[in-house]
Image: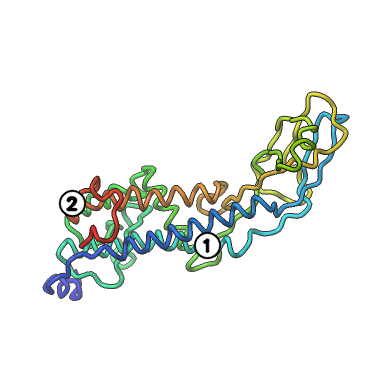
Amino acid sequence: MDRGSVANHHKRPKPPDGHSIDLKVWRAEAHQKALHDEFALIDKIGLVRFETKIEREGLDHSFYPIETPGIPDSFLAKLGDCLHNLRSALDHLAYNLVRVSGTNPDNQVAFPVCPNEFRIDRCTGAEEPTLKIDVRPDIREWIDSVQPYKGTDTGKRLLTLHDLDVIDKHRSQIVAVFAATGTRKTLTHDNVSDALQYPLGRVTWLSREPLEHGKKCLTVTYEAPQLEVDPYLKIPEEILFARRSPAQGEPVIAVVDDLMRLVRDELIPASLPFFGIDPAAARHRTIVVWK
């Protein structure tokens, strides 16, 4: 233990204050909602343009992207802000776990996220634990149990959040791409009678790869030849994390929603007994629960 840590132990620690934890979660929720709203707008407008090719004498209609714009910067900014606030909520949680352990934390305290349980010290060559946080043994045991090196689903999700936040903070915007998810009819009160004159086909082939200009992404097959393209058929667009990204190939919205559940509904409630708070009683908590 260094001199700073010894000094911190001899100072009277301040009581934990979880207001900042909740505030970070609330900010993440606001960005999550904004992300959902923008995705709904993208889905409604349809940013990708497709060319339809009639094949097999009208039995198959295949779709090829001909305009594939990048993901809007505004969407990526909201994504980064949401993930960063979730990661920050865990750092504020760690700060208060140090406090409740009877120690005065410094501003370097962060919630540990360790892919490996041990590492080699560069100076001594000795193997040492990677988990370093000045907390009570029962709190350390819980933090250890959720680490990525445990190989649990919780640990994998925690590492995904950590890695995405690191990319957004230190390297560049998180990279995401469009992908096709299927088809749907665009029906309104005014066009329903015309739209239903075109028969429904079924998707018989769907690429799981990101959309690329001129590369077939989807085929719809009809029971009888259709020599006219259905103008009311829409190709919904999904936004995926790109290759070589954490959570690569997974839908951005689904991952964000899952990481929100991880932090807000799993990790933070699991920590509440360390503060003398009943998780069941605090299920719909507000900041007053920390007073």
- Check disc 2 and report its element: helix, strand or loop: helix
Q: Nearer the viewer, mark 2 or mark 1?
A: 1
Looking at the picture, how far across and down is residue 9, in whole percent?
14, 70
Question: Circle 2 is placed at which residue position?
Answer: 138
Decide which of 116, 84 is in the foreground and name it: 84
Image position, residue 41 (x, y; %): 62, 54
User: Residue 132: percent from the left, percent from the top?
Assistant: 27, 61
Query: Would residue 138 appear left or right of 167 to someone viewing this image?
Result: left
N-terminal label among 2 and 1:
1
Q: Is residue 71 left or right of residue 193?
A: left
The quarter holding residue 200 reads top right
Q: Residue furthest front?
A: 189
- Residue depicted at x 68% and y 38%: 184
Give the Cα distance between marks 2 and 1.
Answer: 36 Å
Report x, y in % for residue 269: 28, 50
Total number of numbered discs in the rendering: 2
Q: Which mark is residue 78?
A: 1
Q: Amino acid at mark 2?
A: Asp
Q: Secondary structure at mark 1?
A: helix
Observer-nearest of 8 and 234: 234
Local crowd size for mark 2, using a 10 Å CA cut-off: few (<14), some (14–19), many (≥20): few
